[in-house]
Amino acid sequence: MRIPTFASLAVVLVSVLPSAQAQNPGAIRQAEAVQQRQQSESGAPFKEGADAPELYAGESSDLGPQSLLKPGERKTHISVSLDSQYFYTDNMLLGTGAGRQESDVLVSTAQIALAPTGYDLGAGKFAPRVGYQHQWQNFGLASDARLTVFDFKTGGLRQARLNEFDFNVQTVFTDARWTFGAWTFEAGFDFRRLLTTSDYEQFYREYVPRWGVQRLFKLGDNSAFALGYEGDYRFTDTDFPPPAFGSDYNDRTDHSLFAFYAQSLGKHVVAQPYYRFKYTRFTAGEDRDDYLNSFGLAVNWYFCPHASLRAFVAYDILETNSALVPDYRAFNGGGGINLTVRF
Amino acid sequence: MRIKFAGFFIAAFCSWSSVFAASLTESTITEVINEVSLLPVNVATPAPAKLKDLVKAPDRVRTGAASRSELTAPDGTITRIGANTVFSFAGQGRELNLEKGSLLFHSPKGKGGGIIKSGGASAAVLGTTILVAATPGGGFKVIVLEGRCRVTLPNGKQRNLGAGEIVFVLADGANFTGPLPINLGKLVDGSLLVKGFAQPLPSQPLIVSAVDRQNARLRKGRWVDTGIVIDDLARPSEPGNGLQALDPNTYQAAVPPPLSPAQFQQMFFKGDAANGPTGRGPVVITRSSSAAQQVGNQKNQTAQPGQPSQPSQTSQPIQTSRQDALSQTVDQSQVVARKLP
């Protein structure tokens, strides 16, 4: 039996495609459970509630009627996810030339959401969600590198370790997804703020309405392809903006086109190469246009129903006409673990 | 139809069971319903089976339509034979040959279980109650009523089944279907092999418990908790991989790119930028690099009108009232433009 089949790949794709930043770790998904589902669905030769035909006269009376069951969709309301990824980046400052700085990075994420199981709406399935996410970004855990920095708080130059750039991200989000056949439409809204790690002072906020559409294409029992578009507008509020700019100088709109491919590698492993082009237009500060090309590969191992491991590599190339940030190229490679429980 | 028995591979634990458990080569008939006959080897005419008859390997037991029989071994192992069935014990170990028809097999815990052979495949059973039905083409199916069962094929493939699951061994004896769930309560209620005898099975309470557990899951609408609901999987607000766990432009609000001296100088003179860009304390100052210098110079040549005024974009001394402090800590000639408009 081919496991996982297209449906499980669809699960993977649906899980990763909407992510504005490429693969989603495994919030996720639970290959073992996916395979259970596929196994029961693809392997069942009869319909739910039907009795298996007799192999010989009188079998049903001797053995008893064999009425097949179908796994029912479990109704859940809450989703809790813990995710941790540790990786190497050759450009943590997203700089260029002498501004490049390599580092190891630990990104830890905790998320809880009121996410009731989707229900039928029209010809499709509708799934709303509202939740909170907290993320910790920590740099240089295994590095003694020091950078020359100007500390605006002390008014002088000094040497700083990479972990002085640690920060936290808090996000409150709500969204809704409507899936109709191979099409998925989604709209949502995020409120996000950035905080210093040392004293939890916020220094950046953004309000993000977002929208997107994607289309899945089945290529075979063990592979699938997807194309999609995503857009958003970010109303921002930045403390202490650069001189001559207002606090909204980060206001911008993003428009992304992406292509994903998913290939199952055995029973519990799925490989996901992807490419994404993202255009960003800044609307309140500079006359600025960003063109970000991202491509990479993630391999996820769903070793138990609620947890998964992954390894990934990613490469980003940014071209911009900004005076405030440079063009850059950044390589990231590492691994992560995800635990997701629904109840 | 007589089904030829092919050679087959027996899983390690099955062999273990056979070696260390008491052999199951004979049983006593404890119930006869309608037409049941014994077919001893080298005897052409079958004899009607009676209560307390001893069935020994390799004698065969045959049942007619709407007939069934129960055999009980000295160790308490129970074999119930359904209608239109031909059955026999193997000459050694705890093996039962099902040539056609169906049977119920119950092996008490600690008695070593047993191995059901049919159509060239085997089903190893340990401490559980199962139903087995041979298919005319050579395969068979196994249904677990309580406990767990492992079915092993001659090629070594195995399936582990739980209560309420059925597996089909295909006619070639080399492949399975996936385990399929069946309604255990409905099966048991309609099964003559379970309820069609005078004495209940010793494992009847366990079967009832298994039915109750399945019914409870059915009532909750989740016979199998897959844990997967497509609609509730990853969303945009969930993290991506690497630095893309956050939107890059938002990320740069937290980790600003290194400042060029021109940008730094501008902020430094501003006076109100007490916390630096984005309110964070440290901002990296890039050091001299010919390549960076070139980048800066190139960018200078392509500066666009209408952009915020920028100071001189070439490497130059930082002219500031705090210059003394700066000069004590950094060689200003090394602070150069990395990228400037």
Image (tube, helix red, strand yellow):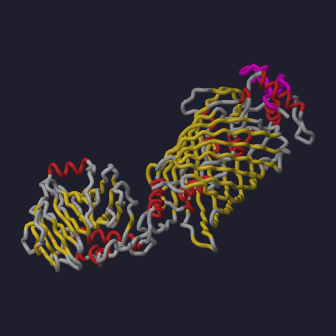
Q: Is residue A322 left or right of residue A23?
A: right
Q: Quadrant of the N terminus of chain B?
A: bottom left
Determine which quarter of the picture holds residue B50. Answer: bottom left
Which of A103 and A23 lies nearest the eye of the viewer? Answer: A23
Residue closest to the far right: B305
Question: Is B331 inside the magenta-drawn segment?
Answer: yes
Above or below residue B18? Residue B311 is above
Q: How many marks?
A: 0
Above or below residue A242? Residue A33 is below
Question: Is B32 inside the magenta-drawn segment?
Answer: no
Q: Is residue B327 left or right of residue A13?
A: right
Which of A342 and A152 lies nearest the eye of the viewer? Answer: A342
Residue closest to the far front: B44
Above or below residue A262? Residue B284 is above
**Position of residue A274 measured from the top left corner of the image (x, y, whole percent):** 64, 46
Q: Which residues are magenta?
A: B313-339
Determine which quarter of the picture holds residue A216. Answer: bottom right
**Position of residue B45 measured from the top left corner of the image (x, y, whole percent):** 12, 71
Question: In this rendering, does residue A203 appear at all?
Answer: no
Question: In this rendering, does residue A277 appear at all?
Answer: yes
Q: Is residue B98 left or right of residue B235?
A: left
**Position of residue B31 measured from the top left corner of the image (x, y, whole percent):** 13, 75
Q: Residue at x 65, y 26 (%)?
A: A159
Q: Quadrant of the C terminus of chain B?
A: top right
Which of A189 and B77 lies nearest the eye of the viewer? Answer: B77
**Position of residue A332 measured from the top left corner of the image (x, y, whole percent):** 62, 37
Which of B79 and A126 lies nearest the eye of the viewer? Answer: B79
Q: Residue at x 33, y 60 (%)?
A: B161
Give the dominant element type of the magenta stretch: helix, strand or loop. Answer: loop
Above or below residue B285? Residue A118 is below
